[in-house]
Image (tube, rainbow, N blue to C red):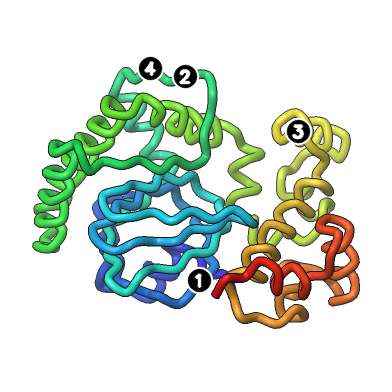
Amino acid sequence: MTYTIPDIFIEQKDPGLVEIEAGLYLERMRSTTRPLTLRNTLHGALFIESGSKTVAVGHRERIVEKEHAIFFAKGRIFTNRNSDCFRSTTLFFDDRFVLDFLGRHNLDLPKRKRKSLILDYGSYRSIASLLDSIRYNYSEKREEFCKILRQKIDLLLLEFYYSYPALGAWFRQLRSDAEDPLSQIIQTHLDSIQSISQLQRLTGMSPTTFHRTFRQRFGSTPKQWIEARRMERAESLLLYSDLSISQIAAECGYATVSWFIERFKKDHRCTPGTFRRKNRDF
């Protein structure tokens, strides 16, 4: 099963989640050692206080430890598992927050773009102090602190930007996606897209305009793009979940198990079961 965050926290009224303003949330995460497949519907920045987190996108895995930050764009599907003593603070924010933040601060954004970034902030005491201050105000959970939290979050993002110029590439990616209506539609409906015609209808474009615009934006045909997203999700579920092959086929939108196995063999030169046995390490 794929959990959508922060939606699931909002729907369940998670006591660890604080809404600072519309489209901006702060979450204190507790340790969950069970591997989970997640998709984020908002952009985010996660700051690890203790322990470690193993994050996998497709077949690529990375262990992230204490005093590291993960900056991620919305619409990512990934699998993660945490160590026993894991604890973190996470910011979730929407496109409006991004455009407002960039509009109020004259930041130099490079031409390149990045959807995610992992940064070690352990040697920057100003960043660590700001995070401690944000956590303190969060613990109060009083309405009058929300304005203070917003100001401190702005300062925190600026501190990261000036300490790590590469963060500008991440902000550029977010701004580009926010100003791109096709990308917005795809990210919003990613879980429910089952066919090219459905995706084309969601955009309101004619078939010809849709295919031309899609290739210009993503560098592939809609069919190739949808298949690639399905395979990324299938890889993560094979490696980091206990779902059966048939359950994974259904979760990833394949009509039959045999069709999923055939497509997987074409991409990986082995069956899903063989892939799982060769690559799982737990």
Badge 1 density bin: few <14, some 14–19, many ≥20, Cα 10 Å: many
Residue type at mark 1 is Leu
Provide the residue designation for mark 2: 110
Name the one closer to the observer, 216 or 32: 32
Q: Residue at x 44, y 70 (%)?
A: 8
Mark earlier in primary sequence (2, 3): 2
Residue 67 x %, y % = 26, 50
Q: Quadrant of residue 164?
A: top left
Q: Is residue 83 left or right of residue 275?
A: left
How far apart marks 2 and 3 lie (CA) works out to: 21 Å
- In whole angstroms, how far apart are the C-alphas of marks 3 and 1? 30 Å
Residue 162 at x, y percent in the picture: 27, 25
**Cα gap from disc 1 to disc 2, whole angstroms:** 34 Å
The amino acid beneath tag 2 is Pro
Q: In the drawing, does residue 277 fall left or right of residue 80?
A: right
Q: Say which mark, if any, is on residue 108.
A: 4
Q: Give the residue type that dot 4 points to.
A: Asp
Element class at badge 3: loop
Mark 2 residue element? loop
Which residue is identified by label 3?
Answer: 219
Q: Which residue is mark 1?
A: 36
- Neighbor class of circle 3 (other Cα within 10 Å; few <14, some 14-19, many 20+) is few
Number of numbered discs overlaid on the protein picture: 4
Residue 273 in which image quadrant: bottom right
Q: Is residue 31 rendered to the left or right of residue 156?
A: right
Mark with earlier residue (1, 2): 1
Dot 4 and dot 2 residues touching (CB under 8 Å):
yes
- Is the Cβ of the residue at disc 2 closer than 8 Å to that at disc 3? no
